[in-house]
Amino acid sequence: MTQFLGTHKGKLDKKGRISVPAQFRAVLEALGTADIVLFPSFRHPCIEAWPAPAFAALSAGHTRLDVFSDASDNLAAALFATAHPARPDGEGRLVLPEDLVAEAGLSEAVSFIGANQCFQIWDTERALAHIRDARARARDFRLTLPSPARGDGEAR
């Protein structure tokens, strides 16, 4: 399995340490990396954690921007200047940078939310509200995913 799935609760200690859930560490192992990149979410009060190769692929589009453009400058400051490389130790622990903890408003109770290609680290109360609200919006807007294509190219 190479998707980050589920919601897992954890604790943030006074030194800023967390334990990445075993299920998420298993995904990293299946992807062939233990290295992740942490940065503040652009959309939510949480920390996003991307496997380093996926972050590199995601950010590769930046090199196609005009070097001196506002778009390049703004994305560089918003994404790269706030990103922190990290690697959980052998037992899955890592220290979250203080600036990310503060920006995400994390307290002692944290939740790890699977987000397919990455996972997010939330304050638990905010995480529960986010999931509840997102499910309601998905229902209200009748959001769906395309059906997987068959081998012959037809939808199922």
Image (cartoon, rainbow, N blue to C red):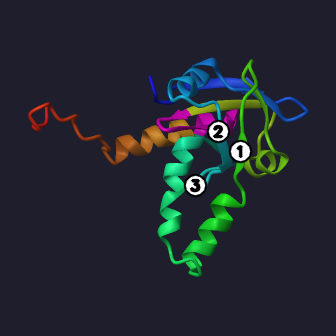
**Front-most of 119 and 103?**
119
Q: Secondary structure at mark 2?
A: strand
Q: Left or right: 10 with respect to 73?
A: right
Residue 46 shows up from this direction:
no
Q: Nearer the viewer, mark 1 or mark 3?
A: 1
Q: From the viewer's perspective, is residue 47 above or below residue 59?
A: above
Disc 3: which residue: 43
Q: From the viewer's perspective, is residue 51 above or below residue 57?
A: above
Percent x, y for residue 21? 65, 22
Asked if the residue under mark 3 is in contact with the one under mark 2, i.e. CB atoms within 8 Å, the reply is no
Asked if the residue under mark 3 is in contact with the one under mark 1, i.e. CB atoms within 8 Å, the reply is no
Residue 151 shows up from this direction:
yes
Q: Secondary structure at mark 1?
A: strand
Disc 2: which residue: 36
Looking at marks 1 and 3 on the same chain, the residue that comes earlier in the sequence is marked by 3
The crowd level at tag 3 (other Cα within 10 Å; few <14, some 14-19, many 20+) is few
Q: CA distance from mark 1 to mark 3?
A: 20 Å
Is 54 magenta? The answer is no
Amino acid type shown at disc 1: Pro
Disc 1: which residue: 85
Q: CA distance from mark 2 to mark 3?
A: 19 Å
What residue range appears in magenta?
A: 114-129
Looking at marks 2 and 1 on the same chain, the residue that comes earlier in the sequence is marked by 2
Percent x, y for residue 106? 77, 40
Looking at marks 2 and 3 on the same chain, the residue that comes earlier in the sequence is marked by 2
Q: Secondary structure at mark 3?
A: loop
Give the position of the C terminus as an image quadrant. top left
Query: Residue at the location (24% across, 41% down)?
Result: 146
Q: Which mark is residue 75?
A: none
